[in-house]
Amino acid sequence: MKKLISILLWILFGGLSIFISFHPIKYLLAEKPILLLLSKSVELLSSNFYMICFYLHIIFGGIALLIGWLQFSKKLQREYSNLHRWIGKIYILSVLISGIPGFYIALYASGGLSPKLGFSIGAVLWLTFTTLGYLTIRRGNVEAHKQFMTYSYAGTFGAVTLRLWLPLLIVIFGKFVIAYQIVAWLSWIPNLAIVYFMLEKQKKLSHSF
């Protein structure tokens, strides 16, 4: 039964990652502002720099989301180590290209100070964990690398949890602004907390043997 649950969770994890990774296509195909861009001012939307940052963030964030979950496959790590390394390089580069502009556009998040802080702190942590993941593997510290990259993908997966939480919060509170103020934090804090407790559980199990 545990194995079945594990397989189903893996399918759900991969399925959500793949599905949401294609979300940027909606923005690329739209002829006018849609979805989150509807909450932005005309002045901001007319800024070429902001729009370039926005598209860099969603496109490369989508790439990181699409390929990053594969790195948790034990079979990929064990039997296809070269592929694992190449996916890792593309993932890290994608996070950097997405995260830096992501921090910039977070400063213009709708809804006041709360979402600005929430998304900008999330972006800084995302970039930090990813950079530390890269540095630790360069130094040969595989265990630390795995931990930092798990935290990194928890940040990447915030693209999924944001889209799961936001509609629910809008239904609960009835207003987009309130929902957005909350989801700016809720999209990534629980993800990091789950990873923390998972890693702590693994440590306790390893020490018990």
Image: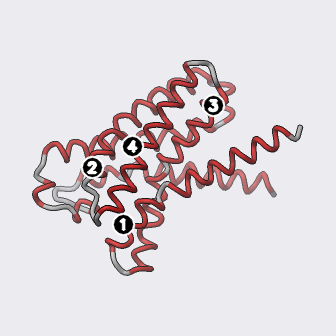
Q: Residue furthest right?
A: 209
Residue 161 image position (x, y, % from top left): 49, 58
The percent coordinates of residue 100 (x first, y second) are 33, 38
- Mark before the other along the chain sequence, 4 or 1: 4
- Identify the residue at image location x=51%, y=41%: 152
Q: Is residue 195 left or right of residue 184?
A: right
Q: Earlier in the sequence, mark 2 or mark 1?
A: 2
Give the mark nearer the N terminus: 1 vs 3.
Answer: 3
Q: Nearer the viewer, residue 196 or 52?
A: 196
CA separation, marks 4 and 3? 23 Å
Q: Is residue 67 left or right of residue 105?
A: right
Give the amino acid at mark 2. Answer: Ile
Quarter of the image where one finds residue 163: bottom left
Q: Secondary structure at mark 4?
A: helix
- Tell me the distance, in whole angstroms, between the alpha carbons under discs 2 and 3: 30 Å
| SS assignment at label 1 | helix
In the image, residue 182 above or below residue 92: below
CB contact under 8 Å: marks 4 and 1: no
Q: Residue at x 81, y 58 (%)?
A: 1
Looking at the picture, tell me which residue is in the foreground, 120 or 60.
120
Q: State left or right for residue 141 relative to residue 171.
A: right
- Residue 85 or residue 174, whichever sits in front: 174
Q: Which residue does the numbered mark 4 point to in the structure image?
A: 61
